[in-house]
Amino acid sequence: MNESMTEKNLFSETQKFRQWWLWLIFVGIEGLMGFSIITQIIYGKSFSDSKWENLLIGFFVVLAVCILFFILRLETRISDNGIYVRFFPVQLKFRHYKWEDIDQIYLREYSPIVEYGGWGIRYSLFGKGKAFNVSGKMGLQLGFKNGRKVLIGTDKPEDMAQNLTAMGR
């Protein structure tokens, strides 16, 4: 996002995966795998055909996924030069959407599962374009002059709307 050192951020938001149910699933899986590993090693009893070594590998794979979800974040910046978005660490550089390429811009309510199949960097099968989302059901819809569409999820729709209005967008 180093397009210009004089560029002014008018809106900035960082979202993370902090849904309680997601972490409950991760903790539950890790807990069951850990319990199964300890039971096999200490008591020699197995709850499945898997050896404890295989369970240990699975435990660390799930742990790595947990760490990835903890690190993942959606960053949105709105400036006088356009809109910047990145899904770190999947995208290391910000994706820049220039104002002159945007034909329509508005906030809207959406259904992450129905319209995009979930959260993350998603592509709609129903012509709604690409979505960057982490939580919630509000997003900034961008329509481009070339027909592309991008939705950027936000947990701060009122702040975003105020800043866009102040910019004349």
Image (cartoon, rainbow, N blue to C red):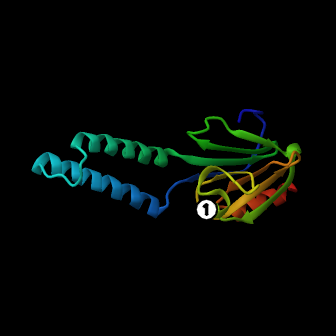
Which residue is drawn at the image coordinates 24% and 39% (left, top)? 53
Instruction: Name the image quarter holding residue 119.
Output: bottom right
Q: Looking at the picture, how far across and down is residue 155, in whole percent?
A: 63, 61
Q: Secondary structure at mark 1?
A: helix
Task: Give the residue at x 80% y 44%.
Answer: 82
User: Image point 28% across, 45% down: which residue?
Assistant: 55
Task: Name the quadrant of the C terminus.
Answer: bottom right
Residue placed under numbered mark 1 in the picture: 113
Quarter occupied by the N terminus? top right
Which residue in the rendered view is the most extreme toward the front? 49
Q: Residue at x 79, y 53 (%)?
A: 142
Q: Position of residue 136 (x, y in %)?
A: 61, 63
Is residue 121 left or right of 164 when viewed as pictured? Answer: left
Give the residue type at disc 1: Ile
- Report the number of numbered marks: 1
Which residue in the rendered view is the most extreme toward the left?
43
Name above or below for residue 55 compared with residue 167: above
Q: Quadrant of residue 64?
A: top left
Horizontally, is 130 left or right of 92 in the view? right
Q: Nearer the viewer, residue 40 or 83?
A: 40
Across and down, in percent, residue 163 comes to 77, 57
Q: Position of residue 16 (x, y in %)?
A: 54, 53
Query: Considering depth in this image, is 81 or 140 the residue closer to the camera?
Result: 140
Other residues around mark 1 within 10 Å, as few (<14) / some (14–19) / many (≥20): few
